[in-house]
Image (tube, helix red, strand yellow):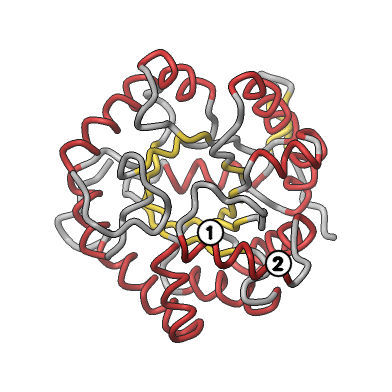
Amino acid sequence: MTYHADVRDTARGAVIHPGTDLLTGQLGGGWPVFGAFSMAGFPDYRRGVEALVAYADNGATVLEVGTPVADPWLDGPAIAATHRSAIRAGHGVGTTLSTVEQVSNLTGKAVVVMSYWATIEARGPRRMARELASAGAAGCLVPDVPAECVEEWVAAATDAGISAPLLAGREASLAELTATCRVATGFVYAPAVAGQRTGYSDGLDLDSLSTFVASVRGAAPATPVVTGIGVSTPALAAAVVQQADVAGVVVGSPLIRAFTAGGVSSAAALVAEFAASMTRPGGVER
């Protein structure tokens, strides 16, 4: 494994991985960015890497790599099927780390891992954070960190030099929402729709999303907000960035479906459509 150079934040005494600076720059660049998700080891290791590289070549600014897990409770049928496929083939954290390393080296883009807490807990938070940093990850989004473990996980990520984005629940109380937003690093993930799993495609209440994002921004004004879940078409992505004050949109299920139906070229073409929809003239500068 290639180990990446780190720098030290002298103000805090914490190591900062270059990927973290890259993520910060991309999300703070003034225009909402497009993020593309794929599962490590799907449909196999080689083609999984090729897909993410193709996504970067076709306009994805941030790349998100899923870690296969047995119980992906937040994921709908399309992504859940990739978890099962990867696990059946023997893929797990090792494949995730290898994928991150390859994709980071080949694309120069910020690579963020999406992992459930069960994987982090089994591996050990500090070990997982160190391994992710060594592989070149900019951060690791964990959507289900137990409240009593949030401080431990964020500290482990910070010490390793990677970001620890957290999910802001649409059903959370104001106190819970505020606590989550203030401790998250890198970005806060705000679902575009309430109470749904990934792959939801029955439309969005943009006014509701805009109001929720404003609440998240109010709780942590300096932390970028990224949205996903329910942003099923390029037209919806364009509408979201026009109306909600988000730094980025991450899409997964539509790309998985396109990949399954037509291979890498089909999914990469859809990435290009999503990215173009968010950068057309008339877009809103952040």
**Residue type at mark 2?**
Gln
Q: Nearer the viewer, residue 11 or 234?
A: 234
Residue at 73% x, 47% y is 132
Q: Quadrant of the N terminus?
A: bottom right
Residue at 36% x, 73% y is 272
Q: Quadrant of the C terminus?
A: top left
Task: Classify 10 Å Cα crowding around label 2: few (below 14), some (14-19), many (20 and above).
Answer: some
SS class, disc 1: strand
**Residue type at mark 1?**
Leu
Query: Quick check: 22 above or below 9?
Result: below
Q: Is residue 164 left or right of residue 6?
A: left
SS class, disc 2: helix
Q: Horizontal and vertical percent for residue 239?
A: 19, 53
Q: How many marks?
A: 2
Q: Residue furthest top?
A: 175
* Residue 271 falls in image quadrant: bottom left
Q: Which residue is mark 2?
A: 102
Disc assigned to residue 63: 1
Q: Horizontal and vertical percent for residue 223?
A: 44, 30
